[in-house]
Amino acid sequence: MKLTSTLLALLLGSVTTASAAPLTTDAGAPVGDNQNSQTAGPTGGVLLQDFDLLQKLARFDRERIPERVVHARGAGAYGTFTSAGDFSDITKASLFGAKGKTTPMFVRFSTVIHSKDSPETLRDPRGFALKFYTDEGNWDLVGNNLPVFFIRDAMKFPDMVHSLKPDPVTNQQDPNRFFDFFSHVPESTHMLTQLYSDLGIPANYRHMDGSSVHAYKFVNAKGETRYVKFTWKTRQGVKTMTPQEAAALQGQAFSHATKDLYDAIGRKENPSWDLYAQVIPADKLDSFDFYPLDATKVWPEAAVPSTLLGSFTLDRLPVNFFNETEQSAFSPAVVPPGVEASEDRLLQGRLFSYADTQRYRLGANYLDLPINRAKVPVTNNSQDGSLNFAVHPDASPHTNYEPSIQKPLEQVPAHRYATTPISGTSQQAAIAKRNDFAQAGGFYRALGKTDQEHLVSNFAGDLGQVKDPTVKARIVGYLLEADKTYGERVAKAVNVKVEDAKKAAADFLATR
């Protein structure tokens, strides 16, 4: 077979850049901006009319049957949350309405990127999702063990996951792919720094913290709104593994974290966490040198101190893994009165995407499954759809609409969504206060000497496999922006000249 010169050059690796074709939608229309969602002004919510975003997310949600695209490998357990006080001054959420009030829960732990049958020892964020069965409906507090994320806009979520997933040709995860992507996403520097620290391989599920990552809103009975971020701290202490320890354990135990959780609860050594909230008044949101609704940022404890909301303990295991853990479904859009979504652009996309994924995986009536169903009566006139087995006895079974005299259902005006001021015009543009590198540098400097050495070694281990010199140099340049010593140490480890790295990063950042 005779190969063309271009194909031969590609196979030999001598062609690194192809001419750019126009980016289009699935329908062939040119895409004007594939980096930013359309928002209501600089700080407003994402607009439903952004069809490119919805098409991209909806298509992404349907890529796997029936395994979750992300968070496929998981383990779960039941428990109870106990409120530490009466917090009705800041939220009307009933689970925080009195000291000592208890709320049943289900918690699902998971790895994020890897498949359902992957080892639990891999470097990966860990999902840490809390389902509260409150007396005013369910609350899915969807979180991770790390407090930040790779991206700040849901427009890039499918691309990010694709880059981290196995190569579509070789079916192998490849640092050349995901560092290529992250070299175009400077805000990922903070998350990459945390992920390549020892926190990237938790010892197990019991010995790790959790975070909402996103900001939400607390709304009280007066309609007053505050922005809030949640963290939950393990009472067992944080424990991690080095790559060497993980590799040794993987050769002995494929499901060590699941086994550890099951064994501990079986021994009645029930794991517990304390739930905290950081609260920012709505009128103080612009008082920081970063945008607080940016998912790549943490809220400094010194500026926004945490308040203990309560604690939860896991004390009961699922009877059937598939029925309970595998069919458990979480969405940040599932909230009770008193908790609402913020304008965080990544969260806004997830409000649609997570629930849509579950409708695809489990059907339109996934909330009727026992593990997902609220513990309070569900009274609406929804009907039909796949697997609709719920029974809703009432005096007028002929009525599948609302409003109706035959079957009146009462609205609750006190639970209307809170009002949010908006300004400006619709737009597709990045946030103003990006500040992509400062917190990554702060995280590095806060580590001890040994932890810094591990971070540099872990980061260099993957970055050193990257073949494209521009990608490698640009990533090192971002680390130099975060912290000079941090960047220089990684540069030396992956054989990149500091001046080349500075130029590669500066050249790209100048285009943004």
Image: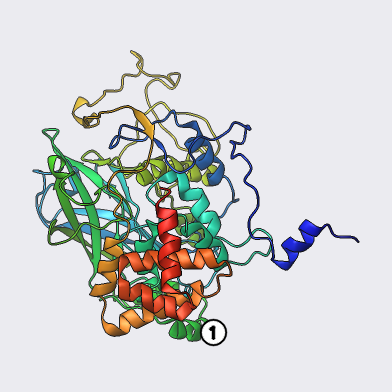
Q: Secondary structure at mark 1?
A: loop
Return the residue nearer the eye: 342 or 255: 342
Q: Quadrant of residue 416?
A: top left
Residue depicted at x 44% and y 85%? 245
Q: Residue furthest right?
A: 1
Q: Quadrant of the N terminus?
A: bottom right
Occupied quadrant, residue 67 = bottom right
Residue 352 % position (x, y): 43, 39
Q: How is the image coloured?
A: rainbow
How packed mark 1 is, by other alpha carbons closer than 10 Å (few <14, some 14-19, many 20 or more), is few
Q: Residue at x 44, y 55 (%)?
A: 508
Task: Give the side of residue 442 with respect to residue 480, left or right.
Answer: left
Q: Which residue is mark 1?
A: 251
Q: Can residue 329 be spotted in the picture? A: yes
Question: Percent position (x, y) of residue 340?
Answer: 26, 40
Residue at the farthest top position: 405
Decide which of 58, 302 is in the foreground and name it. 302
Q: Amino acid at mark 1?
A: Gly
Q: Is residue 259 visible?
A: no
Report the label total: 1
Q: Position of residue 259 (x, y in %)?
A: 44, 75
Q: Position of residue 361 (x, y in %)?
A: 54, 47
Q: Nearer the viewer, residue 186 or 262?
A: 186
